[in-house]
Image: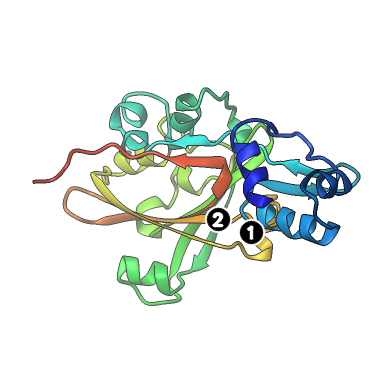
Amino acid sequence: MAAHLREAINQGEYLPGATLPKQEELASRYGVNIKTVRQAVNMLEAEGLVTPIRRRGTVVRERPPMRRLGTERYSKKKWKYGDKVAFIADREASGRPWQRTDQTQTVTLVEADSEVAEAYGIEQGSQVYERARTVRDAGRPTHTLASYYLPSIVEGTPLVDPTPGPAGRGGGFEVLTLQGYEPDHMSETIFARMPTPEEMESLELPAGEPVMILTRRTYTSNDVLIEFARGVHAASRFSWTYDFKLPE
């Protein structure tokens, strides 16, 4: 039964936002009892295909993922010679509008945890700037991202200004360039897990939806680390695209 309903959803018989037939109707259609219907629906919910909504029933989830570009989202022609920071590049590639208030942030001087300390090669507990952002699409949060910087690099720059939106025309990368630390290369690591209760609340996640965790390290041409970032992304709200030349 779950397989039949899954195929119907994937084939467009039940469109995003549509409500599945009532459980009694499904039980009659498939010749099973209500308990079996509930088990099948629970399977679809765990897969992220449907979500129960009070007074509406079982609703097919909206799944119009935003394209998250790979290397192209960091192209210098966007932030160094234009005004398109990474999240704006993703919006344009997805045909989505954006406004400055789509990104809000808080900037705090915090103690480096073990991961940040290891990345920078500093003592755990050393002070670093945390620039924590929440990014929204049409009012709905898509992801959070926290970047960590050494005070000696960003003190007094727009990167420690909590004003909503990017840190200037070209965002943080332009600010770092003006400080003499032009980004040259980076590494990204991505994995999936189930969200914490706090992440479910901040990203407004339905039950059963995982999150994609991204860590990013950005370096200058002489391998100086200038940003360490951690992002938490709602899995159903992004598709991840990477274009690259095959190495020899």
Please tell me how crowded label 2 is: few (under 14), some (14-19), or many (20+) other residues with Cα within 10 Å. many
In this view, the residue in front, 169 or 142, is 142
Could you tell me how far apart the alpha carbons at marks 1 and 2 are, in whole angstroms? 9 Å
Residue 196 x/y as whole percent? 63, 65
Residue 33 x/y as whole percent? 84, 58
Task: Judge whether residue 76 can be spotted in this image.
Answer: yes
Q: Is residue 122 left or right of residue 11?
A: left
Q: Residue at x 67, y 44 (%)?
A: 5
Q: Secondary structure at mark 1?
A: helix
Q: Residue at x 67, y 62 (%)?
A: 198
Instruction: State whether residue 172 is above or below residue 208.
Output: above
Marked residue nearer the N-terminal end (1 or 2): 1
At label 1, the amino acid type is Glu
Q: Residue at x 58, y 56 (%)?
A: 210
Q: Is residue 178 left or right of residue 144?
A: left
The type of colouring in the image is rainbow
Q: Residue furthest right?
A: 55
Residue 116 x/y as whole percent? 40, 67
Which mark, by number, is residue 199?
1
At label 2, the amino acid type is Val
User: To which residue does mark 2 refer?
Assistant: 211
In this view, the residue in front, 123 or 35, is 35
Q: Secondary structure at mark 2?
A: strand
- Where residue 7 sits, quadrant-wise, is top right
